[in-house]
Amino acid sequence: MVNLVHVLTLILFAIAAFIVSSLVEYFAHRLMHIYPKAFPPHPQHHIENTGQGFFLELVEYVKFSCLAMLTFFPFSWELGWSWLIGSLAYAIFAAYAHQLQHDNPKACFWMKMPVHYVHHEYDQWHHNFGLGVDWWDHVFGTYKEADWLVEKAQDVPKRKPLKLKWY
């Protein structure tokens, strides 16, 4: 019989990986703004104000997920796989959320304000670094609210959540 505590530990480890991945993504994006010359594609991303498409975004996020997974495999294969699942889940979510905020920001129903959309539209180089979640912007004081629906997105049509550039 499967040990319930063991299964719950693996589930909690995957959830922790999801949360830690969101924190890593937040700080990685913040570093791109602190040291833009070290990340030359990022200022260009701001100039173009477009995403690469879900699948190309996903490739970028998966690279970091795999590196994080390798940290735990020497200790436990099960924990390594659990961490991988959680960080891959966040990579998929972040790639989707990033592309959605460029293509269809009104569909970001899980946030009061699509922070990445506002980050771009209001040229907020020092605010709203989250891609998939806005938690860390609140925690670290970088959240800056905007009346985006009235000021910038009033002409953006409301579409279904799967209407975005996939590739």
Image (cartoon, rainbow, N blue to C red):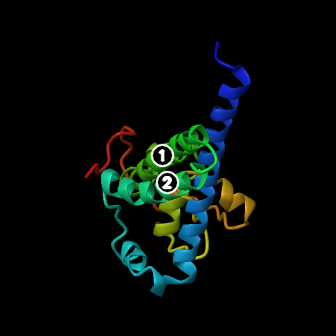
Identify the residue position indicated by label 2 in the image: 65
What amino acid is labelled 1 in the image? Answer: Leu
Answer few, some or many: residues within 10 Å of disc 2's Cα (few below 14, many 20 plus, some between 14 and 19): many
Position of 47 compared to 150: left or right? left
Answer few, some or many: residues within 10 Å of disc 1's Cα (few below 14, many 20 plus, some between 14 and 19): many
Q: Residue furthest front?
A: 74
Q: Residue at x 53, y 54 (%)?
A: 70
Closer to the camera, 19 or 4?
A: 4
Q: Which mark is residue 60?
A: none
Q: Residue furthest bottom?
A: 37
Identify the residue position indicated by label 1 in the image: 88
Residue 42, position in %: x, y?
42, 75
What amino acid is labelled 2 in the image? Answer: Ser
Residue 160, position in %: x, y?
37, 37
Image vertical order of residue 6 relative to residue 123, above or below = above
- In three-dimensional space, the C-alpha distance between marks 2 and 1, rounded to whole angstroms, equals 6 Å
Q: Earlier in the sequence, mark 2 or mark 1?
A: 2
The image quadrant of residue 137 is bottom right
Position of 149 compared to 54: left or right? right
Closer to the camera, 7 or 51?
A: 7
Q: Residue at x 58, y 72 (%)?
A: 30
Image vertical order of residue 142 relative to residue 110, above or below = below
Circle 1 sits in a helix, a strand or a loop, which is it? helix
Q: Residue furthest top?
A: 1
Residue 121, position in %: x, y?
46, 67
Q: Are marks 2 and 1 in contact (CB under 8 Å)?
A: yes
